[in-house]
Amino acid sequence: MQYISLFVAALLSCGSCSRRLNEPDARPVVFDVAVAANTRASSDLSHPEDVDIAVRGYSLPGEASWATDRDDAVLEMEGVRAVHAGGSIWKPENGQTWPERGRTMTVFAYSPYGRGEFGEDGSVIFRNYSLSEGLDPLYCEAADRHYNSLGRINLPFSRALCLVGFEAVSSLDLGMELQVKKLTLTGIRCSGDFSSLPEPSWEASGEPCDLVVYEGGAVLSEGRETLGSGVYLIPQSGSIGVELVAGLSDGTSLRQELTLSAEAGIDWIPGKLYTYTLKITHDLQLVVEKASIHV
């Protein structure tokens, strides 16, 4: 009789465990946010604290993967707004909690909140984006996240734009100086549509525009000068114009103001850093050297 009582108690205990396993987890979901280290389009890999994030999240059973088992996915978060909660942590505004224990989470995200949209294939899309908006569109591709004791999901964002920088060097006669006043890119596309799948890419649109990328007073005499900190641009291919306005002097007085121009071939892709060297020759010609590319 004692053995029967113990057996019944064990069954009841296992049933209770099973129910607890399948109950929703009360632990809140939090996101640990950064800009992915493989897109060093900036030395700062932190996400702006004053910019909210949009999140779509699915749960999957056991060790299932989004890549092969998406038909079994259950939508848990649809366009949920996540706000900064200190350090690198963002929290869902709706207080989202984890699904039942033992399930994985697959998350897609974009930033800033409200500017993009999620595609049915898991893509992040930015439509009719313009550089004039002054926004830095970021996206996070799907990845399977297992439950952990902190309830934390890492969100490594990538940049949809590329960063383009310029350096200048001269081979003027000894004693001559060139003060760079303005650098303009002409015939560049300043608007377009972005999609993260099947691979991150832009479809540039709109009329070509002229974009001032540097205004200052960098002096070229010897060595190499960096013109500003670079500018975020829409990835595109083709040919653009480069126009440099500078003052030529002998070190004490201005001799003449020059406008030098050249063409540059471009083939930009999202998340990369391109640095162009502008060479001013001794006979005052502008030469744009092929860009060096940084991951």
Image: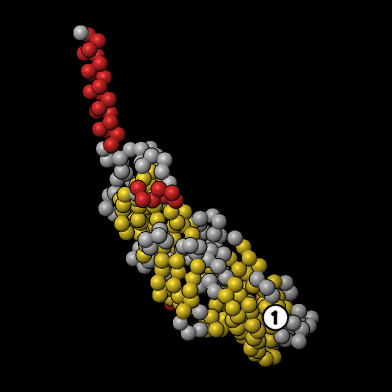
Image position of 263 with respect to 156: above or below:
below
Looking at the rendered structure, the secondary structure element under dot 1 is strand
Which of the 4 image quarters holds residue 267?
A: bottom right
Instruction: Name the quarter where the C terminus is drawn.
Output: bottom right
Asked if residue 138 lies left or right of residue 247, the reply is left
- Percent x, y of residue 286: 69, 83
Which residue sits at x=60%, y=68%? 274
Q: Residue at x 72, y 72 (%)?
A: 223
The amino acid type found where label 1 is placed reads Val
In this view of the protein, can residue 131 be seen by the observer? Answer: no
Q: Quadrant of the N terminus?
A: top left
Q: Quadrant of residue 248?
A: bottom right
Residue 86: where, in percent of width, then height?
38, 51
Above or below 173: residue 197: above
Q: Give x and y (percent) for residue 146.
A: 41, 42
Question: How many tags in the picture?
Answer: 1
Task: Tell me if residue 212 comes above or below residue 272 in the rendering.
Answer: below
Q: Residues within 10 Å of mark 1 (few under 14, many from 20)?
A: some
The image shows residue 106, relative to residue 123, as above or below, that is above
Quarter of the image for residue 294 reads bottom right
On the image, the x and y values in percent for residue 25 come to 29, 40
Residue furthest out toward the bottom: 256
Q: Residue at x 63, y 69 (%)?
A: 275
What scheme was used to colour the molecule? Answer: secondary structure
Q: Which residue is mark 1?
A: 287
Instruction: Report the residue that reaches farthest toward the top.
Output: 1
| Residue 269 appears in view | yes
Residue at the spot x=32%, y=44% of the render?
A: 98
